[in-house]
Amino acid sequence: MVEASAPTPWLLRWQGLLPSPPGLQQRLSLWAGWILIALLAGLPWISRTGLGLVILAAGALWLLWSATQPPGRLGAINLWLLLFLAVAVLATGLSPVPMAAAKGLAKLLSYLGVYALMQRLLAAHPRWWDRLVAALLAGELATSVFALRQLYGPTEELARWADPNSVAEGTIRIYGPLGNPNLLAGYLVPILPLALVALLRWQGWGQRLFAGMALGTGAAATLFSYSRGGWLGLLAALGLFVLLLLLRAIRHWPPLWRRLLPLALLVLAGVLIVLAATQIEPIRTRVASLLAGRGDSSNNFRINVWLAALEMIHDRPWIGIGPGNAAFNSIYPLYQQPKFNALSAYSVPLEILVETGVPGLIACLGLAWCSLRQGLAGLRERGAFSLPRLACLAAIVGLLVQGATDTIFFRPEVQIIGWFCLASLAQPLSPATDPAVEPAAAPDRA
């Protein structure tokens, strides 16, 4: 007896309604690849207007591509994303500033369009992952070189980021084409694990030299940005990726060594971090500013913004004020302390609570849990996305660590990289044990 196939969810019934002439799918995938290459390579260089146009083009192409292909299963990650989108729509409708929140909702939808196109392209053609990473590394390498060149140029512009009221007074911080040292670090942190996996995964000395240069210059630029959150994110991202690689390499070793070796690596890393924080002067200065509490002007500013954000959450805990910085900028002045104007909550968890309340945070926690499970599957998987899963999980962890005390994640230059990592994690798990075997499971479709 043949079992009936599961009914198509009503959200996906519009997919596959348009005819698909011969060759159309190949052309659509090629267009998608080139649009995404242009987007990822140009993130730090394209103007906000240009980025907006490319993002809209990506979303429109996903709509066209989806209308010519039958729907597939949604998958756990996409279900949590849809739940968060539903919460954001509800928060927009009930927002005290609905027009401002609608702008934020439109931005969220546009980013989801980019994510959906990335996921569909990777599901149809997994080899595009390396091409997209190559584009991302090309933009990162140019950005890092441009930023490092600032160390040898006039310091007048750089000095505006040296806060005279900070413990780290006089520190010269580079920012490259992004105009902000913290944003530069936020852009670089999630790319570095991808550069490292490219160094391990790609064949040929030319490709590996390119990946190694991107890794080295990106790490150096992150250090010279003197972004404390960026440094912590860098340690979290690269440290976690190295640990995951180790766990993957020794997964067939005796149980005792599988426990002792990672522990020894963590102890050694901790000792090196302590030595660097106490013996290297620039690092010691930034660590001192981190521990200075309200004695550091940057810390004091953030603490005051966090307290105002907590008051906003207290007043609207269940649905928030609506998504986007426009809604935040409309409501925050009612809560801010004098002389402490802010464009965001300076903490990703607080920002989510402010915008979408407790339900939005729950949806994000569910998304994080699913992403963690998908990423850790790379420890035992031997398919096309095994190592990329580990790198993307490490990149997302780096973003979360930096995002604990900053909201640069919501900038398009950073957020789109996060969506790329999530689209990679959303790919189906492969049952293959042979690394030459491509994933055979049904792909998630957005």
Image: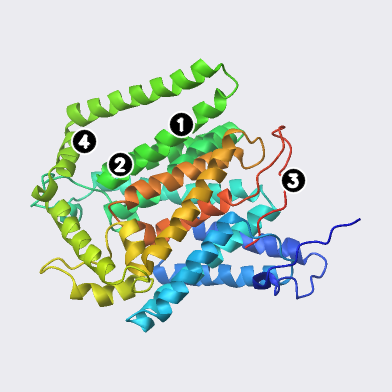
Nearest to N terminus: mark 2 or mark 4? 2
> The C terminus appears in which quarter of the rendering?
bottom right
Q: Comparing marks 3 and 2, which lies closer to the viewer?
A: 3
Which amino acid type corresponds to the residue marked 1 in the rendered image?
Answer: Val
Position in image of residue 228 (x %, y %)? 25, 45
Nearest to N terminus: mark 1 or mark 3? 1
Residues tagged 1 and 3 counted as in contact (Cβ below 8 A):
no
Residues tagged 2 and 4 counted as in contact (Cβ below 8 A):
yes
Q: Is residue 194 visible?
A: no
Instruction: Tell me: 241 left or right of 8.
Output: left
Position in image of residue 163 (x %, y %)? 13, 53
Label 1, label 3: how many angstroms apart (C-alpha)?
28 Å
Which residue is at 19% across, 51% downward? 154
Which amino acid type corresponds to the residue marked 4 in the rendered image?
Answer: Ile
Check the image and name the residue furthest to the right: 1
Task: Tell me the colour scheme of the image.
Answer: rainbow
Q: Residues within 10 Å of mark 4 (few under 14, many from 20)?
A: some
Nearest to N terminus: mark 3 or mark 2? 2
Position in image of residue 375 (x %, y %)? 54, 43
Residues tagged 1 and 4 counted as in contact (Cβ below 8 A):
no
232 or 121: which is nearer to us?
232
Disc 3 designates what residue? 440
Q: Secondary structure at mark 4?
A: helix
Check the image and name the residue furthest to the bottom: 99
Disc 4 designates what residue? 283
Label 1, label 4: how many angstroms apart (C-alpha)?
22 Å
Disc 1 designates what residue? 242
Is residue 228 placed above or below 332 in the rendered structure?
above
Nearest to N terminus: mark 1 or mark 2? 2
Label 3, label 2: how many angstroms apart (C-alpha)?
39 Å
